[in-house]
Structure formats: structure tokens, C-alpha cells
Amino acid sequence: MSLFKNAKFYTTVNHLRDLPNTSAEIAFVGRSNAGKSSAINTLTAHTRLAYVSKTPGRTQHINFFSLANGHYMVDLPGYGYAQVPEAVRAHWVQLLGGYLQTRAQLIGLVLVMDARHPLKELDKQMLEFFASTGKPVHILLSKADKLSKNEQIKTLAAVCRALQPFAERQAVGAQLFSSLKKQGMEEVDAVVAAWFAQWEAEYARPESEQVAENGEEAT
């Protein structure tokens, strides 16, 4: 069963000081109107788990959802849409940037881009900004159903080529995705499941195993 299925709303925060004490988290982020909320709803098999609006930029807080494996999925505010007062926009930037740079529980980022317009300047800035953490990124090229099969192949290949400089600093991958056609669901599920499995192998082992390993290293 998909690890996203049966996801449940956990909490929402508007200030870094209010971030909950959770276990491992993966986060979804993307340009406003890139299809992030639709992707979350499709993956979780909920029609309105993440708010979908015809007005870009409606995700204004950091929203947490609990997953069946005991970990968490996080829906981050969209970036790149500015029909808000400057003070509000500055707060969003501080909230999003602070979370991405300092959140210890964050183990990987799913970056959603419109397949018709991938790797816009703000997307590249997001990749560059997050690269300093060394944590993995997986790109969903959403709305892939808007492209022909040939266009899909060419777009994915072009994005993968453009990602090569980032791959020197962090694990980064890309795939095609369509909420409408439910395309690519198994692939993103497998990627995120591998992130959680790696985290559990490194940080969630029984204390007895860690003590035994430390004892072997000391001898």
C-alpha cells in the first residue's frame, strides 16, 4: 500500500517557533500554481487534503500530515506569486526559508514543477538554496498529461541534464507526474519510501544495536 494513502491532517503552523516535535518528515514545495496541492491530493487519495484553489498562492502556512508509517508529510507555501502585501510576502519567505534550512526532521524535498515550464529561475534558486543542506530532492514534473509522449520524453531528458551540476552536492532526481492521469504515483512513492527507510536505518535502530556497534568500534 502507498505510504501516502490514509494520510491525516496533523497541524498547521505560521511561525517557526510553533513547529511540532515530530519524527522524520518529507516536504512538498513548488511555484504557485505548479500543481503541488493536486499532486498531494492524488497521492493521498483525498480530494481536499491539500487546498486546491484557482487563485495561486493560497497555501500560506506550513501544513503537517501524519503518514501510516509513523512519519510526516509537509505541505509548504508556494513561491513566486505576489498578490499579497510586502510584509506578508516577507513573512512567507522567512517561514519557508527557515524551515528548509534549519528543520532537522526534514529528510528530503519533493519539488513540484509544471512540466510545460520546468526549471524557471525561482525553481533554480530553490534548488541552489536547498543544496547547502545536502538532503535529497526529487522533482515532480506535474501536469505531464498536457504534453505529448514525445514532449514528455524530451522534457524529462532536458531537466535531468540541467540537474547534473546539483547532483554533485546532493541526490537529485526527476520524473513525470500527472494528477489527472495518475501517472508516476508508484515512482514518487518508491523514492520517498527509500528516504524514510534510509533514515530509519541510520537513526531509528534499537539502542542495543547502536551500543553494540559502538563497542565494536572501540575495540
Image (tube, rainbow, N blue to C red):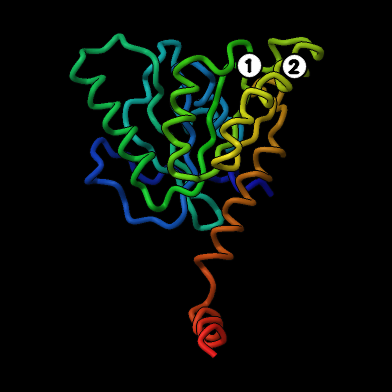
Indicate whether 200 appears above or below 46: below
**Direction from residue 183 to residue 78 in the image, left or right:** left
Q: Could you tell which of marks 2 and 1 lies nearer the N-terminus? A: 1
Left or right of 195 in this view: 121: left
Q: Quadrant of residue 116?
A: top right
Q: Nearer the viewer, residue 77 or 156?
A: 156
Residue at 68% over, 17% down = 144
**Relative to 196, does residue 185 appear above or below in the rendering?**
above
SS of the residue under disc 1: loop
Residue bearing mark 2: 152
Q: Name the residue tied to disc 1.
A: 115
Cβ atoms under marks 2 and 1 closer than 8 Å: yes
Q: Residue at x 39, y 21 (%)?
A: 79
> Would you identify the image quadrant in which residue 39 lies?
top right
Residue 38: mark: none
Q: x, y (%) of residue 199?
A: 54, 58
Using a 10 Å C-alpha cutoff, classify the residue at mark 2 as few (fewer than 14 neighbours), some (14 to 19) or many (20 or more).
Answer: many
Q: Nearer the viewer, residue 194 or 39?
A: 194
- The kind of residue tagged 2 is Gln
Q: Is residue 30 above or below residue 194?
A: above
Which residue appears at 43% of the width and 40% of the height? 132
Q: Is residue 140 left or right of residue 15?
A: right
Q: Amino acid at mark 1?
A: Ala
Q: Secondary structure at mark 2?
A: helix
Q: Position of residue 171 (x, y in %)?
A: 60, 42
Residue shown at 56% from the left, 33% from the top: 166
Q: Tell me the crowding category of disc 1: few under 14, some 14 to 19, or many 20 or more residues within 10 angstroms, Cα based.
A: many
